[in-house]
Amino acid sequence: MNIIEIRNLKKNYALGKTTVYALRGIDLAIEKGDLISIVGPSGSGKTTLLNVIGCIDNATEGSVKVSDREITKLNDRQITDMRLHHIGFIFQTFNLIPVLNALENVEFPLLLMKKQSKNEIRKRAEKLIDEVGLRDYLKHRPAELSGGQRQRVAIARALVTNPDIVLADEPTANLDSVTGEQILNLMKDMNRIEQTTFIFSTHDANVLKYANSVVKIRDGLIVKEA
Amino acid sequence: MNLMIKIAWRNIMRHRGKSLVIGVILFVGAFLMTIGNGVISGMDRGLQKNIVNSFTGDIVLVSEKQESDEVFIEMMGKTVEPINNFKQVDSLLKTVDDLQKWVPIGKNGALVLNEEGGAPGFTFLIGVDFERYQKVFPNTMKAVEGRLFNPGEHGVLVPTGARKQMFEVSNIWFIPEGCGVDTTSMFKEAKEMRSNLVSKQSIVFMGMGADNTSTDIRLGIKGIVRYNALNQIWGHFGIVDIESYRNCIGYIAAADKASLVLSDADKKLLGGEDTDLDNLFSVDGMITENVFAPPRSSTKTSTAPKAATGPSLADAIQTDLDDGTYNLVLVLLNDHSKLDEKVKAVNQRLKASGVGVRAVPWKKAIGAIGSMAVLIKSALFVFVMFLFFVAIIIIVNTLSMAALERTSEIGMMRAVGARKGFISTMFFGETAILSFFFGGLGIVTGYVTVRVLALCKFTSDNDMVQLLFGGDTFHPLLSGGDILLAVIQLTIVTLIAVIYPMQVARSITPLDAIARE
């Protein structure tokens, strides 16, 4: 069963008088529970593709279905709800809320959802923090955590809502190799434990071994799926 | 909500510098606004007390023939039209609700003749039945030399301001009857002339009637008076007994009407031979001395003959002061806030009855002074509004910068599912907390300052400052309503100041955050 279906996706940016064709007709289908790596050189369109799938950017043309919903036709509120309920994000620069501690950062999306009691939210967040190995850092604020620890918190936060998809844009780019490897192992573990679809972008060939399948992208077009 | 308050509070603490800047602006703004409200409120109360309750009343009734509403200080020298039927007006006023009390007065200008041969001076005269006047405007003045009128007494009470003005024109220093020159109350120029100072205990007024029929009248000075507030302004108005006033201006005096009932002596005089004509028309000089009978009130009384000067025209006749001519009727209301409503009601009643009189609100009647008071009040209001504006601009700027600096954080919140509403509420929450804390502190400090300023009892002799003070003493006042007004003003400032930054924050997208990275 496909969790993502993309047909003829195009994305253009106006840059002054010139137009940048970031995506020039992507066709892609991703199955639920998969762990996909999108690889390609800088400027190939990896991040743009992830942003469109993650409802962060709009498509110029084409169709993008996430969890059976055509996201190109949604309004701002629907798009926001889509991000909250169906998609988890892990950004390159460990974007956490600076004034909240690790536990509160993980709780944040659940508090926005307003579906569970405080106790349920607390238990769920603690479970995930535990799974990413930060039990001893619950009350630490982002500024008090290392890069790897912050990325772990981001992974826990991305998973806390049980999303259909977790998108990670170069999650190891700012980490040393050991920490990066730990993070990729963690993502692989979480993919197995939580049965969540993971899509991560990278331009590092070494991280490909962690993915179940690889999508190579160049100049806004898919050149190879493996 | 807890989450938002938590984030808002922690953001305030995280950005202490910016929070402090906004907080200080809110504090200063709220502080000055509270003081401004206190001054305006004190001025309002002072003007009410020192103009309405002491001099003009809430409503001033004037003749329908009166063209200008500015009847107190008529700069062009025009006379105030007479009201000859006060009794009718009085009966009519008794039928209107919520009128507390009223008093008829005469008011016009008069020349102060210089018996030393110099140029005449000018003063405004208010003709009153003093006893009756004081029932409506009690304790508005005190005698600094001499005394106030005894009941029904004839003469003039000269305010300190008028005395100074007369001295500047004539070099004559007026003092009350039976009193010596009191140097303690003299101003510098008079003291310098002390050795050859001309002092007089009576004044010769030449009334300025509309038909140029006026009489020179000499009135004994009973007292030099000082108004309890706004003495610089009211000091131009000398107080004269109503019958002397009428005589001076050339109006029908009550005694004139009463004299329709002639005494035997008068009949004899009028029916005499040609040789008696000299007796009929002669006076001791060109100036009419104060010939009226002793004490009378507005009620009918019998006047006693003047033993020292022999019988006069007004002696031994039945008089009612209200038979004579007045210029204005000053009306005090039970509830000052109902001024406009009551002016309308009185005017409707007056018009329907056809008595030839109309009602004017005090601010119009007082003319330039009322306008000046309104102007000062407006200027204060504009100043407070300006503070509003400046505070809003600075807060908007600071908050907008803060929003843009937090693009990553806000964009990330949006990326993980925070709606625009959440961002708005979070942003508003931060400003509201600052506003509540610092603004509240500003209001409390402003309140304390107003109380302290009121206790200091600053005084001024300057006309403009007195208008600002609402009297001669600065007495800012903060009622519960004023504090509520300050809270509302602070809330408005906060709401207006946060709108644009909130829009800026709402418009931040996850993509903006990524782009910034």
Image (tube, coloured by chain):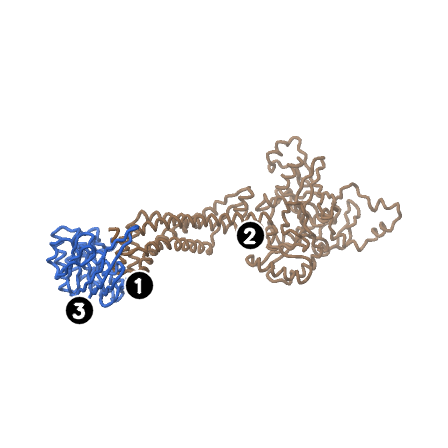
Chain colours: A blue, B brown
Could you tell me which secondary element the residue under label 1 belongs to? loop
Label 1: which residue? Answer: A75
**Co-location on one chain, circles 1 and 2:** no
Which residue is tagged 2?
B48
> What mark, if any, has residue A1 been given in the picture?
3
Task: Estimate how packed mark 1 is, as few (under 14), some (14 to 19) or many (20 or more) residues with alpha carbons within 10 Å.
Answer: few
The residue closer to the viewer here, B447 or A5, is A5
B463 lies left or right of A72: right
**Chain of the residue under label 2:** B
Task: Using the image, tell me which numbered label, if any, was put on residue A178.
Answer: none
Chain ID, mark 3: A
| Res. A139 visible in picture | no
Chain containing the residue with disc 1:
A
Q: Is residue B114 above or below residue A156?
A: above
Amino acid identity at mark 1: Asn
Query: Which residue occupies the foreground of this view, A186 or B480?
Result: A186
Q: Residues within 10 Å of mark 2 (few under 14, many from 20)?
A: some
Mark 1 vs mark 2: give the one in front: 1
Res. B217 image quadrant = top right
Q: Is residue B259 left or right of residue B464?
A: right
- Looking at the image, do the residues carrying marks 1 and 2 touch, with CB atoms under 8 Å apart? no
Residue at image point 67% right, 54% down: B63
Q: Secondary structure at mark 3?
A: loop
Above or below for A80 versus B40? below
Return the x and y of residue B159 as percentages of the image width and height. Answer: 63, 43
